[in-house]
Each structure stands twice: as structure tokens, then as C-alpha cells.
Amino acid sequence: MILNFDLSKENQQLLALAPNERICYAVPYDITADGRFLSNSYAVVTDKRLVLLEEGTLRKQYLLSDCDKIDSEPQIDCGLLIVTVQGKEEIAARFSAKHLARFSYVARGCTLLLEGSTKLVSSEEYEKTCPNCHRALPGTRECPHCAKKSGGFVHEFLSMLAPYKKQLALIVFIMLLAAVITLLNPEIQKHLIDDVLTDKKGTLSQAFFFLGMIFALSLFMVIINISKAYLCSKLGSMISMDLRAKLYHKIQVLSLSFINDRRPGELMNRVVRDTTRVKQFMEDVFCNLFTVCVIFIFDVVYMLILDVKLALMAFLFIPISIFISNAFRHNIHRRFHRQWQKNDDVNSSLQDVISGMNVVKSYGKEETESKKFDELSDDFAAVQRRNETFWAIFYPLLSFTIGAGVYLITYFGGVSVLNGTKTTGELLQFINYTSMLYMYLDWLTNLPRRLMDLVNSLERINDVMNQEPRIVDDKDATDIDIRGAVEFKNATFGYKSYKPVLEKISLSVKPGEMIGLVGASGTGKSTMINLIMHLYELDDGELLIDGTDIKKIRLENYHSQIGVVLQETFLFSGTILNNIRFAKPDATYEEVIRAAKMANAHDFICRTPDGYNTYVGERGFNLSGGERQRIAIARAILNQPKLLILDEATASLDTESEYLIQKALERLTNGRTTFAIAHRLSTLKDADRLVVIDGHSIAEIGTHNELMEKQGIYYGLVTAQLEMQKVSNEETAAAQA
């Protein structure tokens, strides 16, 4: 998403920049006030003006000093850039839906300019654009488009093979042996026919000698092929295993923003299916590729040496086949790339339904989901069927075109034998070389399909591998022993930088203090916790831990000192013991039991069939919601965290369990800095301070009693909850009566 398009010389002249004026943004707009589509029209923002260049004319300009506000508003199938001057709104530009995100970034940047900020907002994509073609680089180190032009695939493939040089050297040597033996066979057959069989010139011992050589070479060829297949299979498995490990590690270190933008089934396909495709290519294609290329080259040379005229006849059909293959190359790539996309859709749908089967069954949507899956499967099958039909027609026709030269060779070569200018053995030798040429050319024409599979798989693998995590250890990052002081200084953050979720937040928390975060849904409470957990980084401002910028603290060191209980409880497949030990793998059995007791989980664990060794299914679905929550709390407190994060930690507990957990949390939070979010505000009344977030900023701060006396936003929330509880109690009493 480029936010600074190159302006033509004519537009630059119209813009007439002042000596110290610089362009901040230059983006196209494409709709007039009466709905006509435009071309060569740009909204240009400098550090002093907003200028609208429309089809070679300067339509209008605004001085930023005169503007109160510049905003972008989405409409139906279009968007508006609205400028407010002295309290009066004007529609500065209209643009189609494809420019909505771009103008949102620009509007946010204009807001910062109006506020006097020297730091401009830009999209992550614009910060990483290709210097050559100006295409977006979403996190990648290299432009995929330019890489294809500069042999990027070959470079990536060779880079993938680089760590396996010794194995490759042995495989290449075996391939060369296979090529030499294959090329020798027609020569021996020629001597057998011309020197032994023709006119009964040779003796029986000579015949056995040549037949023995043919048999020995064939046997040796079998041994070579077995060795080659074994080594290539072993190499393919090693590469596939290493790629899977690298992908898995890369996904672990990548930022949540990347993971959340990808479907689980899509990522699973890249780790499993795409690496398997690489393995299959090494086993089925690469093991023959070098042999085929060597044979093909030397075959051409031998044919030219043996008979130039017949060789040229044989070569006549090669350019035709190459032209046809090249003409359909992009079509083949597009077809199989779409096939992989449809496969991702099917796998992602399956992953979603299996993960959410409780919801599907609760709403009785089994039939609906089955129909959706059938539609996706039908789409995938249709694409696959079209691709296979195309290949079933294209490949035989191409093979026939390639092999047509054999008929010419047989006819004109036969005439030469009848005329006495060529022997029968020489003709048979030439036909063998010609057939060999066409056979391997036929194999090479089938290569694009297998190559496209590999290209698509490597592109998808490298799409992940080339991503750079947005949160990494700073080069000056150090380990610290956290005491628990947390401070936000004028902090601003948005999952999209043009749309802040938290804006200009300032808050200072002392070590050991318990802070309750309160506010309506969507105001940024969970976002604030995500920032404290360092899952995202601020767009502006600072977040300090014990006076140290959180960016200067080593990630592993920081995360080892925080405990987290999130709103959505997640347990891994495995035993209860392993789930609790996840926070501290080397914890003793006694430490695990102590943590479970503090979380009020020990008693119910002891009632399970195998106690702490009881296996819990995927996501812990064979436990109740309250039991899962208590195990998650035990996991959070096992490593004695210095910072404690509680996001609806008691939401899934019944009244009795909640009371016991609250008592346990009182002991746990004593002396630890705690940030807690709770739906039931009554559970936060004992917090040292309550922070009320409204309108993406801090609206109120104080204790429960202080905020109730103030009768502001917090008072309204508590009153509303009490009213709802009162109505609920009355309805319950009426139902019981």
C-alpha cells in the first residue's frame, strides 16, 4: 500500500513546492462529485498544505494551519476525504473502495501534522516497499516480483540445498555414472549388430561378449538407480524435516499480528503439505534432473557428430515444443497456484469446524456447515478437475509433437541404409539416440507441472520464512529483575496505525499495586494488557518497566517474570501436570501441587482417574470451564510472577469456586503488581486503584469508593450492573414462586 506515489513532472510543477516544504503523502483519488471516474488525480499532503491535483490541474488546496480536522469516512462502495475549516466541513475528494485504507492512513497522518507531531504515520506495507518496482513488501526481505525476474526461485532453491553439499556431491556423481552408462548402450548395440550379427561376421563368443557387456551395464544401472533413489529420498526427507522445523520455529517467533492475519489451516498447509511437496520433488524429479540434462546435452552432440542432416530433422520439432511449453508456463503456474489456494480454503474450513464443534452442535448447524464444506470441496474439486483435464490434453499433444521426428528419421535413415551410405547398426544407434532425446525432452516438458508445484510451495514457505517479527530483542536489551513498577507515558497504539485503540495514555503504577481496568467492550482494556505483556509495541510514547523501556528488556527474561490468565482459557493436549508445568518446565511435583492448591484446583484434580497424570483432550474439553480456568490460574502462579495479568480470571467459575479463587488471588496478588479485568465489577472493588478507559483514553482513576462518590462513568457502570442483578434476582424469585 504505497502512500507516496511518484508524481509526474507536470504535477510537480503544479504543486510548486516552497524551498523548505516537503511531501508527506501523495495518493490517488478517482471519483468526481458527479460520480465520474478520474485518472491522473492525486491528493498531496505536504507539511504545510493539502493539495488536490485533478487531471493536470490544481483543483484546490488547503493550508494545514487553517484546518481544524482532516478525516476519512467510508461510504457505500466509496470513501470521502473531509476537511473541516473553521468549523465547516467540506468534501475534499472522493475515492473508490480500493483506496479506503490508504486514505485512512493519510487522514491519521494529517491529524498528527495538525497536532504538530514530527512523526508521521505510515502503513507497515509502505515502510517496506521495493525500491525497484515500488510494490508492497508485507514483511518480506525481498520483492517476490523482482526476485522472479532475477532468478529468485533458483537462488532460493540453491540456498535451500546449500547445507547438504556432501550429499549433493555424491548424488551428482551417481547421476553422472547413470548418464555415461545410458549413453554407452546404443554404441554397444551398434557394434553387436554391425560387427557380429550383420552377414554373420562375428563369432558366438563375440556375441556373448557384447551381450554380457549390455547385461553388466543394465545390472550396474539397476544398482545405480536404487542408490540414487535411496540417497535422493534420504536427502528429500532431511530437507523436508529441516524446513518443517524452521517454519515451526519461525511461526513461534513471529508477531501475533502476522499469525492473526493467517488462517490456521493455511499455516498448517505450509508446515506440512508444502514441505512434503519439496520432499516429493527431490525424490521424483531432482533424482533424475541432472542425469536427464547431461544425457540430453551429450545426446545432441553425438547426433550431430553421427549425422548432421538427420540430427537437424530430429531437432526440427524441439523449438516447437519449447515454444508451446513456454506459452503455457504462466497459465500452468496460475492454475496450480489457484488449486493450492482452494486447498487452503478446504483445510481452514475443516480446522474451524473441528475446533468449534461445540458451537456448531449447540446451534444445530451441522447440516449448514456440511453444505459449506461441500461447496468448498466442490470448488476445489472443480479446479483440480479442470487442471487435470488441461494436463491430460496438453501433455499427450505435446508428446506427440515431440515424437513426430522419429518418423522422419526412420524414413530418411532407412533410405540411407538401402543406398548403402549407412549401416543397419548406425541407423539403429541413431534411432536410439533420437528416441532417447525425445524421451528425455518429453520428461522435460512434464517438468513445468512439477516445477510449478515446487515454485508455489517454496513461495509459500518463503512467505513465512522471509517475514520479520515486529517485536524482537533490541541490540542493547538486557535482563532485569522486575520489581513491578509500570508506567505508560503518552502512549498511543492501534492494531492499524491509522486507527488508535489507545491514545495518549499516561499511567504510573507502583510495585505491588493492584490495578483494575474498567470500561465498556472495545475501549482498549485487553489491548492495554497486550501491551504490558509486550505482545505488541506502541506506535508512539513509552512503556517503562521499573524505569526501563520495555524494548530494552530481553523478551525471554521479561516473559519469564509475568503470569497470565486470559479470558479464553487454553489447555494443551497432555496431562494436567504438563499443562501446569508449561510456565516452568523444571518445576518439582511439590511446586505444582502448591500452585494447584493456591488456585483451588488440587481437590478436583485428586478426584480425576489418574490425578495429576490425567490426560486432558485437545483444549481441555473433557474438563469443565471452571476446572480449566483453575488449571490456567495454577499455571500462571507456578513461577511466582512479578507481574500478574488477570483477564476475566474468574469468569468461568461458579459462586463457591469464585469465592475460593478470590481468596487465593488475594494471597497471590499480595506484594505483586497486578492488572485485572473483570466483567463483574464487584470483584475489583478491593483493587488499589481502578482505571476507567473510555473513548480510547483514561477517563477516571481512583479507588472504588472515590469513583462511586464522583458519580461518573464508573458509577454508571456499577449502577447498571446492580440494576441488571436486581432484575435477574426478581425473575429468578418469580420463576421459583
Image (cartoon, helix red, strand yellow):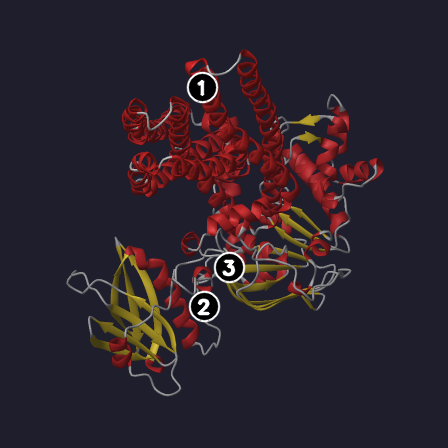
The amino acid type found where label 1 is placed reads: Ile
Classify the position of the N terminus by image quarter.
bottom left
Where is mark 3, residue-wise?
A: 713
User: Residue farthest to the top?
Assistant: 204
Residue 365, image x, y percentages: 41, 26
Earlier-in-chain disc, 2 versus 3: 2
Label 3 neighbourhood size at 10 Å, few (<14), some (14-19), many (20+)? some
Mark 3 and mark 1: Cα distance apart in space: 103 Å
Does 64 sit left or right of 358 as displayed? left
Instruction: State the residue in front, 422 or 496.
Output: 422
Residue at the spot of label 1:
193
* Crowd band around label 1 with a 10 angstrom C-alpha radius: few (<14), some (14–19), many (20+): many
Circle on res. 422 = none
Task: Work out whether 44 lies above or below 392.
Answer: below
Cα separation, mark 2 vs mark 1, equals 81 Å
Please identify, in this view, whether the residue under mark 2 or under mark 3 is nearer the observer.
2
The residue sitting at 63% across, 36% down in the picture is 238
Q: Earlier in the sequence, mark 2 or mark 1?
A: 2
Task: Give the foreground label among 2 and 1.
Answer: 1
